[in-house]
């Protein structure tokens, strides 16, 4: 597909591959166990939806040469807050706030036509990521934080990349209806977040 030749996709793909390659160098034994847990952990519905949404939003709402800022802001905030979570820092009603972060990302997709200020959008991305990071860190396995962190960062990068590809696909193939598509995706995402919240 032609949109895969987009200059944004190449560095994002190389970054994801670099992270994946880094995981292959993790030590065996405890490191392997922690790595596996890290790779799997972000696959919960709330984390997965949020991370894919960040990729879609970044391509749709940020200038083309700055679209990587969304995933970068998310991952930086994620790893910092995960380290804090591993040290015991937490918040009351954390799971509920994580579910509401999915609603937030749904609203951000709906509002792509409005064009939020870049700093505000990135701030919201980083804030949501900090909630997800605290949850990741709180579940650090006994095998240790480093391999576990490599694992969840690798999965996060892949999910962001999937969102980027989806966003580029919307831009290329349904550009004239992009606002409607983003509105529909945002509504579905927001509804999913409300449902996840109701189950807590």
Image (cartoon, rainbow, N blue to C red):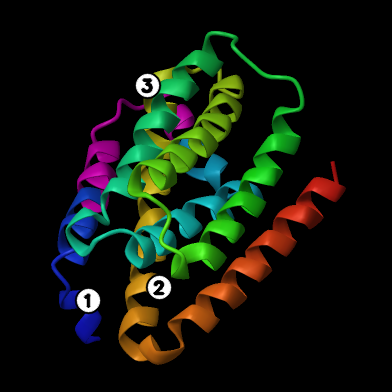
Mark 1 is surrounded, within 10 Å at the Cα level, by few (under 14), some (14 to 19) or many (20 or more) other residues, namely few
Mark 2 residue element: helix
Q: Which residue is mark 2?
A: 166
Q: Which residue is mark 1?
A: 4
Mark 1 residue element: helix
User: Looking at the image, is 57 positioned above or below residue 184?
Assistant: above
Residue 54 figure quarter: bottom left
Q: Marks 1 and 3: CB-CB under 8 Å?
A: no
User: Looking at the image, is 199 positioned above or below residue 114?
Assistant: above
Q: Earlier in the sequence, mark 1 or mark 3?
A: 1
Residue at 55% x, 17% y is: 85
Tag on residue 126?
none
Viewer-side residue, 181 vs 192: 181
Q: Earlier in the sequence, mark 1 or mark 2?
A: 1
Viewer-side residue, 25 vs 100: 100
**Residues in magenta?**
16-35
Mark 1 vs mark 3: give the one in front. 1
Relative to 187, 200 lies left or right: right
Give the x, y percent position of residue 153. 38, 38
Q: Which residue is mark 3?
A: 146
């Amino acid at each position: 597909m032609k949109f895969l030749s987009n200059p944004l996709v190449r560095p994002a793909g190389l970054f994801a591959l670099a992270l994946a390659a880094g995981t292959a160098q993790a030590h065996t034994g405890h490191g392997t166990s922690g790595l596996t847990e890290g790779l799997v952990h972000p696959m919960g519905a709330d984390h997965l939806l949020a991370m894919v949404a960040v990729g879609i939003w970044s391509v749709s709402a940020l200038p083309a040469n700055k679209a990587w800022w969304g995933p970068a802001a998310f991952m930086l905030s994620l790893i910092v807050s995960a380290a804090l979570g591993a040290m015991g820092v937490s918040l009351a009603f954390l799971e509920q706030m994580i579910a509401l972060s999915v609603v937030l990302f749904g609203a951000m997709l709906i509002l792509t036509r409005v064009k939020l200020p870049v700093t505000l959008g990135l701030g919201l991305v980083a804030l949501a990521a900090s909630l997800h990071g605290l949850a990741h860190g709180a579940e650090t396995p006994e095998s240790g934080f480093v391999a576990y962190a490599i694992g969840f960062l690798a999965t996060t990068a892949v999910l962001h990349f999937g969102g980027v590809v989806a966003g580029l696909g919307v831009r290329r193939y349904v550009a004239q209806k992009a606002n409607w598509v983003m509105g529909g995706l945002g509504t579905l995402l927001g509804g999913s977040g409300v449902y996840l919240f109701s189950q807590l």
